[in-house]
Amino acid sequence: MAVTLVVVLNFASCSKYEDGPSFSLRSKKARLTGEWEIVKVGTQTVGDTYEIVWDFSKDGSWSHSASYTSGGQTYSYTYNGDWEWAADKEDLKVTYTDGSNTSTQQFKITRLTNKELWLEDSSSDKWELEAK
């Protein structure tokens, strides 16, 4: 009976995101940490123009690296900051510094697997990221 209770509670705790997964053997933190490439924001496919990578570390640090080519010249930049869970691990909050400005963005997580991360921002734009 105790084993059944543990299994039922694990299934219930893993299905918090509307697009899944309904079950995972990996913790949310283990699924999130690592490098993610942004492939789509809203209706725009990002990989056609830019390469944007987010890197989530286990210690709560985060980086945003982007590169693009224009007129034969390649440009790149990186923001560093921190990430944390919000809203009982249903949201993801990132804080970063751009020069002397500090910004915070919070996203609703709609899908979190070890290969896919789907987010929704405050403007209701959907973000799709794939593990690198």
Image: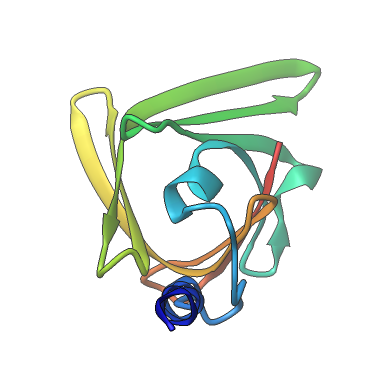
Q: Residue at x 62, y 58 (%)?
A: 113
Quarter of the figure that contains the C terminus: top right
Residue positioned 45% across, 77% down in the render? 16
Q: Position of residue 9 (x, y in %)?
A: 41, 78
- Relative depth, front residue between 8 and 21: 8
Numbered label tally = 0
Q: Position of residue 67 (x, y in %)?
A: 64, 26
x and y, in percent, of residue 76 in the image: 58, 20
- Left or right of residue 114: residue 103: left
Q: Is residue 69 left or right of residue 63?
A: right
Q: Nearer the viewer, residue 59 or 54?
A: 59
How is the structure coloured here? rainbow
Looking at the image, residue 44 sits to the left or right of residue 62; the answer is right
Q: Nearer the viewer, residue 34 or 96?
A: 34
Kindly give the residue lying farthest to the top in the view shown. 73
Is residue 2 placed above or below 103 in the rendered structure?
A: below
Q: Relative to 100, is 93 above or below?
A: below
Which percent across, then down, holds residue 93? 30, 53
Location of residue 106 (image quadrant): bottom left
* Residue 106 vs residue 74, the one in the foreground: 106
Q: From this viewpoint, which residue is outermost toward the front?
A: 1
* Residue at left offset 32%, top offset 29%: 59
- The structure residue drawn at horizontal position 24% and vertical position 43%, both measured from the top left corner, is 103
Q: Quadrant of the N terminus?
A: bottom left
